[in-house]
Image (cartoon, coloured by chain):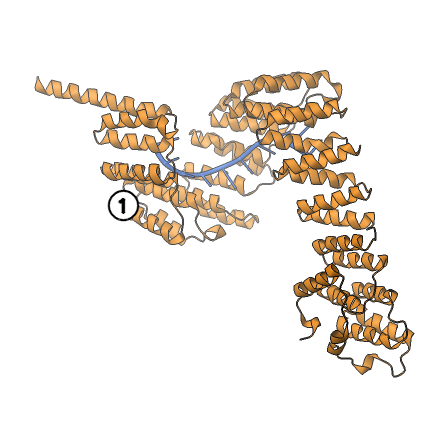
Amino acid sequence: MTLFSLPAKKICKKVKSFYQFMSISSSSSLARSIDITEQHIPHRPDYVELIRNMQSLAASGNVNQSLQVFHFLKNIHGKPSIYDYNALLNCYLKSKDVCLHGILVLQLEMISLELQPNLPTFNTLLKGLNLVGETKVGFWVVMVMCKYGFVPSFDALSTLFKNFLDSMELADAITVMELMLELGYVPREPKVILLVNSLSKHGMIKDACLVFFKLLGKGCFQSSYFYNPMLWSLCKSDQVDSALAFFCYVEKKGLVHNECSYTALVYGFSKKGLFREAFRCLKIMETDLSCYPNAKAYTTIIKSLCDYGRVKESLCLLGEMEKKGCEPDIVTYNIILRALSQENMVLEIYNLCESLYGKGMTPDRYTATALSGLLKRGSVGIAHNCIRDIISSGIKVDVAVYNVYLYCLCYAREPEGLLSMVRSMIQDGIEPNNITFNTILKSFCEDKPLDKALEFFEGVDWPEMRPDLVSFNTILSSACKIGDSSVVHRVVDLMEIEGVKLNVVGFTCLMQYFGNVGNVSDCLKVFEHMISYGPHPSVVTVNTLMVSLCKNGEVEAAHQVFNNLKSYGLEPDSRSYNILLRAAKNQRKQILAADTNRR
DNA sequence: CAAGTACGCG
């Protein structure tokens, strides 16, 4: 086997070991392995002609043949030189077939001929590795050239830095950046911002800090663009206290915040429900003319208020920001519309939409999906109309909008329109996903018995190749609710075949099934199984158990379960109380009825 | 560089 038939990885390893031990061996075995063809070599070796032949072979991608010529140069005294080699490599890089393997084969030849690489050798090599996208090998070559006493150029390192960033190899990017700093190079600002940003977004906040402080120490990159991603990352991961400390530290260092810096803190505080602190940040911004609170800052608090169920206050804040001359944008409206629709506050929705249109703003796909809450609250007609209007206004829609619209059709009891809607979305170039089919499945499950639903479930070509947990739970839940044991068994079997494990929702459904068919003992068994082996029951699970117990006359046991709620790490909800209240009422009724009968 | 969507259990 000749060296040239080795796969690139092996050769790479070989070259590496050659370099590492600097033990440049004799090339005799290599020479023997090369089959020299006469056609490329003139009878009277003429240097210029050989070089020309060799270069044209290399430029057309014939590595082995060009090497044969190169090797033949040994017949000329003092040849081949490293300059000949560099020219060869350069010509090869012009070939359209250039690849890592070819580059490494050429390297191996250089080593075996004991040619000492010079600076252009390394630069050409780096250019080639960059060309074939081998950033890691490129970086390793940089280390070797440093060992040889050559200094890699700013451009070479900058290219490596950029490539590592593009391929998200952040640890390598940091190493390159550190080498650049050691050599006195300052990486370009947009790239450094990208690095800090990527590190922050991927939870590598400590590395981001390290990079930041390293560069801050060098006196560069003092703009807030540089550290805002870190502030946001801290606030998003619930570390608003660290964010605040960082914020104050850089301020002390003389760096100047912008709106985005403050908004990060506003986000961090309001996300934790610390609205007083969030509003204080807004106040401070108002005193700082260069950081006057903008729509994003207000919207951040509005979103959190909505998340905490304080929709009325978010409406007030909307009015306040307008009064202060800060115009809400479509995002602000979408957030409030979503909250209003969850609370079924139809009148407010109409008013808000009117104000939105009055300002000449156009709703977008998020506006359409924001209204989905209305559906669950029973305002189907209103949601249907609003969403239809939004879709027909010609905005760019996506699969989520279609899914919500499908939901409308389901609730509007227009099941015949469902599949034609799926066809029309495919025609629009939007691929249905599992949510699309789960929505339709849910609609089929409304029709009892479940034959049609089961047929759809087993017959449809699921996207992503298979039904997911939600799909299984949807049909399982329906079957359990009506106590259809054959469908329950079928679904559980299918889950086993597909290797999908029941989660807390599925187990809760099964408990409901056992409760419905009067089998309290199996219902309890499922619950005990969950306690011992997981998944951990939710408050819905415990409510289901309590219903089952009450239904089967075990009101005392239901009370005990209720009293144990806390020991499972759960808090009762309003339904938990209602279950016991209703059970107590029923008991009283029964006693009264028995009394009346006796009299 | 920052804020916002859709499906399953009661």
Residue at position x 28%, y 30% from top? A547
Quadrant location of the N terminus of chain A? bottom right
- Whether residue A189 is visible here, answered yes or no, is yes
The percent position of residue A383, horizontal first and vertical second, equals: 49, 32
A257 or A436, nearer to the observer: A257
In the rendered view, does A356 fall on the left or right side of A522?
right
**Chain B, chosen colour in render:** blue
A286 or A521, nearer to the observer: A521
In the rendered view, does A564 fall on the left or right side of A260?
left
- Badge 1 local density, few (<14 within 10 Å), some, or many (20+)? some
The orange chain is A
Q: Name the amino acid type tagged 1.
A: Ser
Q: Name the residue under label 1.
A: A485
| Quadrant of residue A108 within the rendered picture | bottom right
In the rendered view, does A459 fall on the left or right side of A587?
right
Residue at position x 31%, y 37% from top? A527
- Whether residue A258 is visible here, answered yes or no, is no
Question: What element does badge 1 sit on?
Answer: helix
> In the displayed image of the protein, which residue is found farthest to the bottom?
A43
Please report, as a chain letter, where disc 1 is located: A
The percent position of residue A66, horizontal first and vertical second, equals: 80, 73
User: How many marks do you count on the picture?
Assistant: 1
Residue at position x 17%, y 22% from top? A590
